[in-house]
Amino acid sequence: MARRFLEDHPTAKIVVRERNLGLNQNIVQGITTALTAVPFTVVLEEDVIPQPGLFEYLAQAEAAYRNEARVFSIAAFHPIVNDEGPLTTFFSRRFFCWGWATWADRWQSMLPRLKGTTWPYEHYWQIPSCMGTDCQWAHRQHRMGRKAMTWDRLLALWTLKHDLLHLCPSTRLTANIGLDGSGENCTADDPAQRLFKSANSVDGAVWEFPKKLSPTEAMDEKIRAYFTNKSRGYWDQIRKRLNYELARMRGLKKYGL
């Protein structure tokens, strides 16, 4: 796949790791590498599929907030959207990683915190309720000494602590195809699969951006309710982890590993 990509894009650069760094380090180091070469980058993981018009949206937003240091990221996906309304944007306190972009200076300001093991809140109950309960779960796992895929939640909490904002679109501009039960994000019975697998083309659209740098409280309340309902406590997290491990073992057996 990498060779085929280079044939179509001969000026592209592919970075190959000498060893498996794990999810957290690989993503953080990959973004850091990209932003040492360019002032602004788009982050798409392997299971995130961009829709037509995504990059035009990101380019318009980058130009609008290039000099606004409080705007940390531009999201391409948001779970609480209105696909039937006009193409608008809003600010959220919550960071979303299923397709996003950021600037080198803003990333560098957060990088030391992502490399360390310090969380911005000492106790999980100190995390503001607007983040939902999944960040509290990740915090508890960390305090218990368990390694977890938490780079995105750690970044979400540090940007919240520093009162930074994330621009979100009114429609989904990426789809996540890693929802077959074998991945980290969703098990096969997750009711959100249909939502995450769908996205919309906005090719040629001209976007409206808010001039006031402040979060949309009504949307953040919906985010809190969504992530609180999605987490559903310890037993659901345990069930989800067991399903993940069973799916992973079935995959290893299928491929003779």
Image (cartoon, rainbow, N blue to C red):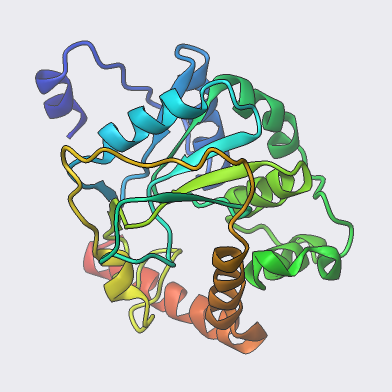
- Establish if 29 lies above or below 52: above
Q: Quadrant of the N terminus?
A: top left
Quarter of the image for residue 3 reads top left
Query: Residue lying farthest front?
Result: 211
For this view, does 31 lie left or right of residue 118? left
Q: How many numbered callouts?
A: 0
Quarter of the image for residue 231 reads bottom right
Residue 239 visible? The answer is: yes
For this view, does 241 lie left or right of residue 189? right
Camera-side residue: 158 or 21? Answer: 158
Query: Residue lying farthest bottom?
Result: 235
- Residue 48: x %, y % from top left: 31, 50
Camera-side residue: 39 or 144? Answer: 39
- Establish if 256 lies above or below 168: below
- Establish if 184 lies above or below 6: below
Camera-side residue: 93 or 179? Answer: 93
Q: Quadrant of the C terminus?
A: bottom left
- Residue 143: x %, y % from top left: 82, 62
Quarter of the image for residue 131 reads bottom right
Q: Residue at x 52, y 14 (%)?
A: 36
Residue 17 visible? The answer is: no
Q: Residue at x 44, y 73 (%)?
A: 244
Query: Residue lying farthest right?
Result: 122
- Residue 239: x %, y % from top left: 52, 85
- Residue 110: x %, y % from top left: 69, 33
Q: Residue at x 28, y 34 (%)?
A: 55
Q: Residue at x 35, y 84 (%)?
A: 189
